[in-house]
Image (spheres, rainbow, N blue to C red):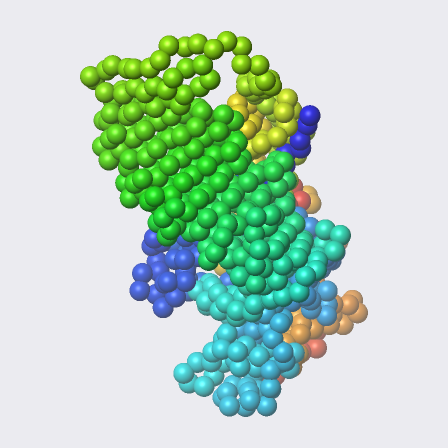
């Protein structure tokens, strides 16, 4: 029989980037430039979580301004926005790294763009822009704008952002400055962005949704409903489906001995199981990071079905953990907590990676399946572990005296000092450790023989009756499963991706003779080193490692897929841009990091705007062409080299005095000036009094010789 395995159903891939904010695989090293910074705590937390990426020199540059695109990307990452809208902005090509994030933001409803169909991804995000976005993300009701006049610079807050600014101030997500200003047009820094989004997320997740009546709740027809806060299920008979919970999930005492079912549910926080009975809690095709079982009375049964995967389960009360037709990892790591009361019973059925026992005087029963590693802590004395004939432990480590009962197999047992005198009903295949010779093997009596026991100590000796009996008759015993699953790749064995491209793994097909208790695991490496995912923003050769084992512990031969992430295309970079205005006109200075040949696909496009009272961009009018003022290579001699005094263009006049070859790093300038007349007055293309107060904005876009387009640089 066959099962399909996809990356989203193995490990914790389903949580993607957001999971890093919940349970990072490792903590990042302290960064260089935040020690003593006012936002040090939040910045370090975000770096540790992998949410905030630093620079190659080990810094995060907290005081550097953040662009609109960067801010949007952070918001999407933290709030888990994944659905995209169809978007078309004149200054954002589909090849731009920010295109996907902007499409998500538009779909989420907190970004619309400007009236001229631009989005200004490379412009710094201002405080009022950030406030307006965050107010929509958190779902704040419109703020009372009549409170804004208490700010000294309230008149500088654009009309379109006033309600958003008022809302974030009222909710304490943002604050004004001590001098009673808000600085609405001030650029937001990276540190301010982190603190702002952190506060917004805390506000959003403070809500709790309670389901206290039997019924089915959640998204319809695979549509995912996102709940940013906590969820409580407090009644039996509740089915929750197609839901992503950003906070914690509590299965409360109100469930009693009834049932609760979760289908296609992701929980980013902790799942607390406080209610449920013998039939009770079913997790189907779900992703749960941490589960804590702590029911006051009785035993709760928790079943992982389908592609369900959990990272850890902490058991504090009697429980049954069972995997049923599991195609995902199911229960991986289980901790039997010190809080388990004496004589509590924990029953396991399935395939587990690690079971750590810290509780004393409890009983653990393994009904069927296998455990890769069992560790009995020194505090867990007088614990018994019973293995049925269909159960197996690959590696057992005892640091306390324990009883190992039943006929199940233990491949290797390590007996340390604290475990001297431990008792085994079935002798391990191999024993290790300082007290390996101290164990007692007490084989139970069977039909036709008297009981017997043996000690593994150096004194040796054994006693027992002679065998007898004959054919016992009765039923048949199913032969042991010794056949390993087989993994077959879907799709190509080697995949090549463009830098920054989205990647969805094609997965594999698993064939097994039994088709039950299969446990799949997907891991990743890059250039021989273990990594937690394929990061298409880091070039290199990645390997996906697919591993599967069955309930009998048979392991399939590992299958690999190679994913090559190409180096980033080196787009042209606009450097040192500066805009100034005086009585002579509007002067733009900048340079380009690579040589530009204007006879090719290359171009340098400059668009000019003013800002109206509401902060909207209004194109400057070119009265000669009766169109918006836009300069490009067809504009004769429009670029001037400050150092060589050359003019650049490939204009229609083909003036030989103008060069079409711009050297890398050339210090370029271009001027817009009223009253600059040619012979026919045809250069007097604007009608602007430069002494009048106004805000001017230019947008620069460079296309290189191969047609690669730079990020838009905006200066005001």
- Depicted 366 relative to depicted 288: above or below: above
Is 229 in front, or is 148? Answer: 229
Which quadrant is home to the C terminus? bottom right
Instruction: State left or right for residue 84 relative to residue 17.
Output: right
Is 240 in front, or is 256? Answer: 256
Instruction: State left or right for residue 442 relative to residue 631.
Output: left
- In the rendering, at what x and y percent does residue 268 appear? 53, 54
- In the rendering, at what x and y percent does residue 60 appear? 41, 56
Q: Is residue 298 visible?
A: yes
Q: Residue at x 44, y 44 (%)?
A: 345
How many marks the image carries: the answer is: 0
- Depicted 339 relative to depicted 211: above or below: above
- In the rendering, at what x and y percent does residue 294 appear? 46, 55
Name the residue at the right extreme.
626
Is 427 in front, or is 81? Answer: 427
> Quadrant of residue 502 in the image?
top right
Q: Is residue 715 visible?
A: no
Is 36 in front, or is 248? Answer: 248
Name the residue at the left extreme.
459
Q: Residue at x 29, y 25 (%)?
A: 440
Q: Residue at x 56, y 67 (%)?
A: 208
- Depicted 277 relative to depicted 688: above or below: above
- In the rendering, at what x and y percent does residue 325 appear? 63, 36
Which quadrant is home to the N terminus? top right
Q: Residue at x 52, y 69 (%)?
A: 206
């Amino acid at each position: 029989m066959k099962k399909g395995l996809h990356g989203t159903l193995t490990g914790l891939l389903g949580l993607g980037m957001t999971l890093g904010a919940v349970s990072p695989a490792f903590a990042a090293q302290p960064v260089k430039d935040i020690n003593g910074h006012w936002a040090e705590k939040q910045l370090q937390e975000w770096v540790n979580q992998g949410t905030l990426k630093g620079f190659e020199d080990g810094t995060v540059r907290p005081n550097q301004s953040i662009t609109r695109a960067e801010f949007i990307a952070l918001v999407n990452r933290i709030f888990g926005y994944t659905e995209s809208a169809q978007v078309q902005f004149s200054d954002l090509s589909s090849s731009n790294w920010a295109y996907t994030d902007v499409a998500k933001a538009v779909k989420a409803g907190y970004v619309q763009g400007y009236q001229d169909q631009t989005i200004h991804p490379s412009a710094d995000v201002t405080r009022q822009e950030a406030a307006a976005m965050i107010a929509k993300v958190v779902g704040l009701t419109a703020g009372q704008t009549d409170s804004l006049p208490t700010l000294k610079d309230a008149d500088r807050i654009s009309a379109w952002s006033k309600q958003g600014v008022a809302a974030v101030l009222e909710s304490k997500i943002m604050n004004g400055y001590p001098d009673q200003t808000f600085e609405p047009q001030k650029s937001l820094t990276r540190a301010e962005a982190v603190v702002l989004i952190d506060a917004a997320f805390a506000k959003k997740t403070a809500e709790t949704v309670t389901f206290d009546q039997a019924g089915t709740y959640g998204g319809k027809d695979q549509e995912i409903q996102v709940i940013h806060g906590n969820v409580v299920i407090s009644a039996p008979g509740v089915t929750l489906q197609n839901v992503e919970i950003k906070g914690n999930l509590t299965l409360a005492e109100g469930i009693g001995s009834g049932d609760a079912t979760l289908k296609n549910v992701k929980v980013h926080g902790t799942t607390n199981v406080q209610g449920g009975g013998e039939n009770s809690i079913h997790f189907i095709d779900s992703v749960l990071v941490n589960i804590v079982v702590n029911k006051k009375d009785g035993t709760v049964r928790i079943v992982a079905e389908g592609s369900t995967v959990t990272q850890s389960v902490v058991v504090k009360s009697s429980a049954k953990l069972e995997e049923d037709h599991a195609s995902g990892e199911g229960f991986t790591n289980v901790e039997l907590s010190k809080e388990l009361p004496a004589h509590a019973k924990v029953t396991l059925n399935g395939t587990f990676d690690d079971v750590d026992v810290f509780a004393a005087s409890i009983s653990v029963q393994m009904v069927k399946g296998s455990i890769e590693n069992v560790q009995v802590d020194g505090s867990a004395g007088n614990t018994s572990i019973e293995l049925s004939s269909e159960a197996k432990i690959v590696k057992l480590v005892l640091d306390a005296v324990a009883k190992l009962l039943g006929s199940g197999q233990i491949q290797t047992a390590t007996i340390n000092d604290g475990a001297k005198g431990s008792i085994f009903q079935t002798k391990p295949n191999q024993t290790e450790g300082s007290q390996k010779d101290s164990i007692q093997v007490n084989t139970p009596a069977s039909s036709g023989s008297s009981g017997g026991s043996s000690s593994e100590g150096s004194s040796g000796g054994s006693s027992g009756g002679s065998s007898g009996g004959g054919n016992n008759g009765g039923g048949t015993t199913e032969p042991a499963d010794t056949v390993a699953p087989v993994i077959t790749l879907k799709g190509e064995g080697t995949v090549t991706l463009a830098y920054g491209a989205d990647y969805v793994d094609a997965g594999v097909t698993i064939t097994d003779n039994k088709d039950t208790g299969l446990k799949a695991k997907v891991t990743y490496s890059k250039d021989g080193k273990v990594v937690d995912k394929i990061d298409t923003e880091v070039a290199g050769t990645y390997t996906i490692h697919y591993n599967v084992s069955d309930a009998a512990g048979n392991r399939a031969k590992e299958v690999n897929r190679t994913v090559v992430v190409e180096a980033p295309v080196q787009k042209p970079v606009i450097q040192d841009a500066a805009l100034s205005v005086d009585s002579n006109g509007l002067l733009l200075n900048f340079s380009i990091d690579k040589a530009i040949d204007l006879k090719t696909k290359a171009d340098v496009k400059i668009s000019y705007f003013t800002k109206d009272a509401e902060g909207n961009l209004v194109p400057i009018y070119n009265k000669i062409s009766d169109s918006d003022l836009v300069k490009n290579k067809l504009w004769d001699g429009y670029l001037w080299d400050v150092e060589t005094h050359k003019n650049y263009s490939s204009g229609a006049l083909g003036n030989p005095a103008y060069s079409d070859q711009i050297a890398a790093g050339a210090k370029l300038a271009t001027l817009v000036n009223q009253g600059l007349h040619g012979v026919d007055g045809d250069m007097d293309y604007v009608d602007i009094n430069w002494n009048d107060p106004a805000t001017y904005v230019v947008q620069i876009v460079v296309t290189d010789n191969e047609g690669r387009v730079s990020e838009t640089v905006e200066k005001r």
